[in-house]
Image (cartoon, rainbow, N blue to C red):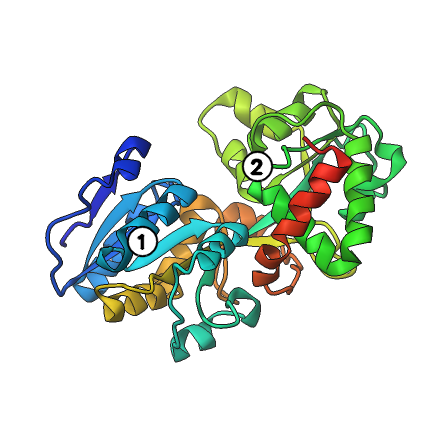
Amino acid sequence: MSQSRRLVMPLAALMAGAAFAAPAVADEVNVYSARHYDSDQDLYDAFTEATGIEVNVLEGGSDQLIQRIKREGQASPADVMMTVDAGRLWRAEQEDIFASVDSELLDERLPANMHHPEGKWFGFSQRVRAIFYNPEAVGADELSSYEDLADSRFEGEICIRSSNNIYNQSLLASMIAHHGEEGAEQWAQGVVDNMARDPEGGDTDQLLGVASGECDVAVANHYYYVRMLTSDDDATREAAEKLQILFPNQDDRGAHINVGGAGMVKDAPHPENAVRFLEFLASDTAQAIFSTGNHEFPAVEGEPVDEVLASWGDVKTDDLNVSVLGENNPQAVRIFDRVGWR
């Protein structure tokens, strides 16, 4: 099998415009990726095995890749840009990075809420923003929704990341969609009032905060918890076993989801290969890799999931179109500033 070429470029090289790859050939696709998961190599290798098309990968931060594509202009070798979170996909869209893709296969395979309305990008994996709690301190009947996080009974008990984290920006964007700007601001103020500490660290740090007793409730993407549960480190697994996961709002709209997604770059030198790559990401093979490789939920309905996710049973998720999370992002950032969410 022909192996893909993976170029992990440091920030300095990205900003300096370092060369991407050899001159373009017909049987290749150039992917600029802000995903940094080792399992994604399995995606690229499986695509090459299925199609004979080489995958050349340039990795970097989402904003850096967006600026690089803009700087390269029509000469950019980029065919596809991949990243995580609808907020980042929206940023790329606002910078006119993507071309619209019309694909019957993607229309058939992916749920409507995983499509940008104009086909500029698509969600291929799902990430639930879950709630975690210490079952020795919080009763199962005390907590069932995101809205509950703003209740005064949780004063001084919540660990959550900073407002500059895109995952939290998208969560607040969803609250705007469901409750309006005023209702979302009241919720955000309530969460700030209930924080056990100033926001710090990543999602794993929030989970460890509950395990250590620093707080009783935390918010994190579900796969960080699975990584802890399946860690080779005994202490990490023991910390995870102290937590209980809660999928919020199962009695109404369902849990907030975000996506790992991708779109075709508007000046893609290999547009046919770019579309084939996007369609492959919706295939049974790719959907299984998303689930087993990074413990993400597949975007395609009915696809099997890894054993930890399967043990949770059916999870009701919000069917809000994920493009709304990007559209509401500027409002969310302003709300965070007004309520003093650091």
Q: Quadrant of residue 203?
A: top right
Q: Look at 54% across and 20% down and name the residue there.
A: 235
Q: Is 180 positioned to the left or the right of 106 in the image?
A: right
Whether residue 313 is visible: yes
Assign a secondary structure to mark 1: helix
Disc with the residue nearer the chain's start (1 vs 2): 1
Residue to which mark 2 is pinned: 225
Image spot of residue 15 (x, y percent) = 30, 37
Within 10 Å of disc 1 (Cα), the crowding (few <14, some 14-19, many 20+) is: many
Quadrant housing the N terminus: bottom left
Residue to which mark 1 is pinned: 43
Q: Quadrant of residue 240?
A: top right
Whether residue 259 is visible: no
Assign a secondary structure to mark 2: helix
The residue type indicated by label 1 comes to Leu
The residue type indicated by label 2 comes to Tyr
Q: Is 5 positioned to the left or the right of 335 in the image?
A: left
